[in-house]
Each structure stands twice: as structure tokens, then as C-alpha cells.
Amino acid sequence: MNAGDVTVELVDVVREYRIGGQSVRALDGVGLTLAAGEFVSIVGPSGAGKSTLLHLLGALDRPDSGSIRFRGTEISGLDDGAQAEFRLRQVGFVFQFFNLIPTMSAWGNVAVPRLLAGQRLGQAKADALTLLDRVGLAARAEHRPSELSGGQMQRVAVARALIMDPVLVLADEPTGNLDSATGASVLELLADVAHEPGRGRTVVMVTHDQDAAESTDRVIGLRDGTVGEDRAAVAVGGPR
């Protein structure tokens, strides 16, 4: 793997929390390299450190020690303002419960990150509509979340995650509230996002669903805050 192919590199990352007066290591010396154009799943039992790892990758939290480098630049030491700017412009987030604004249309929800970046809603509309078309929801652009199915809401969330053209997309249990067929379509969409020619995006998905994990390119298993396995998925590249 060439240096230019690396999106994120973690070296000996430790994150501790105080629970009931005791110190608990959610991550204990984790080292990983995540490549551009890769669809990665993170699996493991509850308490293994999956969500903590995702939060660190998205600069929503800081490690207690170790290094997290994004395209060669250390992000763990950034101040709060710089981390917020990093999250806005470099990272797209997809959540299990969609996190859509109920009073806004589908295209308005997609455009929200552009509003946070200082752009007017109307200026962002064309790009939001283009992304909704890409995820198969052009006909639902004016519908509010209450008028959409779970799968449609998750597709809106994926479109929203892409509106700033991020290098890193983080998905937290994106199929957790979907039936198997709808979940498979969302996985296919995420794979397309990772494998899009010329973009060099990395998609990282936390999941409890082993079948979903095996549809990605690579499976990273966490246990007790450490990497227990790091292997190619059974169906490598799954839903290309």
C-alpha cells in the first residue's frame, strides 16, 4: 500500500473512561490502516470498543494516547474548532436512526451540511437533488421524513453524508432498523460510495450483523478494546 493510498492510520491508540470510580480501557493499543476506496466493517460484541473507534475516526472524541493521522495529518491534537471543521468537510456520517429533521424535505435534509458551511439553502438545492437522484430518490425530493420508508430515509442520510464530498464516510449500524432486503440495498449503496472511481473514499461501517459485514471488503473484529481479527470478507467486495 502506497502512502498516498492511506486515508487513516491509527498507531497504538488508547481511550479510557471512568466508570463507577474505575478506569476502563475502551480501546487498548489499537493500530489500523484504512485505505482509500475501501469498504470496511467493524464487528464485535457490545463493549468491544466499536463505537469508541468510530467516534475517534470522526473526531467526535480524542484518544488518551496514540496517533490518529488523516492523510498524513495528525487529527487527535486539533483544537475544537479545527476538529469541527474536519468533521464538516472531510467526514460524512450515517446513523442507525437516520437523524433527519422532520420539518424539512428530503432535499433540505441532504443540504443541511452546506447550511452549516455557510451556504444558503437554495444554493445547495441543485447538488442535493443530484445526490437524491443518485440514491434513487429523485421522485421523493419534496417529501418529508414522515412520508418516507425506513430504507428511503437511510438513503437520504447517505446522500446527506456525501453532500460535502467527504473522503471518509462513517456508518453506525446503518442497516439496524431495516428489513433484510432494504438493508442489502443500503449496503450496495455504501459499497458504490466506497468504490466510486476517482474518488478515493473510505467507508467504515460498525455493525452487529455478520452477514452485512461479510458483504464489505474487509472485516475488523474488536474484542475487549483490541483488534482480534483483520481479514478480507468472505464475499470480498460483496455488493459491487
Image (spheres, rainbow, N blue to C red):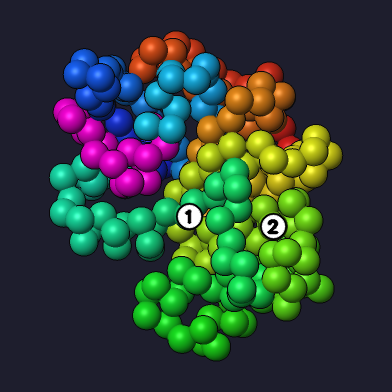
Q: State the mark number for residue 92.
A: 1
Question: Quarter-wise, where is residue 87 in the image?
Answer: bottom left
Residue 26 horizontal/vertical position (percent): 32, 22
Identified at 43% across, 32% down, the residue is 51
Does 42 appear above or below 172? above
Q: Where in the figure is residue 111, as x and y percent of width and height?
A: 54, 73
On screen, residue 165 above or below 96: below
Q: Quadrant of the N terminus?
A: top left
Q: Is residue 17 magenta?
A: no
Q: What span is in magenta?
A: 53-69
Report the amino acid beneath label 1. Gly
Q: CA distance from mark 2 to mark 1?
A: 16 Å
Q: Amino acid at mark 2?
A: Met
Of 194 and 22, the residue lying toward us: 22
The label on residue 167 is none
Name the element at disc 1. strand
Picture quadrant of residue 25: top left
Q: Is residue 23 visible?
A: no
Viewer-proximal residue among 235 and 94 = 94
- Check the image and report above or below for 152 versus 41: below
10 Å neighbourhood of mark 2: few (<14), some, or many (≥20)?
A: many
Left or right: residue 6 versus residue 156 is left
Q: Position of residue 165 (x, y in %)?
A: 49, 63
Q: Nearer the viewer, residue 142 or 195?
A: 142
Q: Are marks 2 and 1 in contact (CB under 8 Å)?
A: no
Q: Which element type, helix, strand or loop, lies under badge 2?
A: helix
Query: Residue at image x 73%, y 78%?
Result: 142
Residue located 25% across and 26% down the image:
17
**Numbered tag placed on residue 153 in the rendering:** 2
- Residue 67: within the magenta? yes
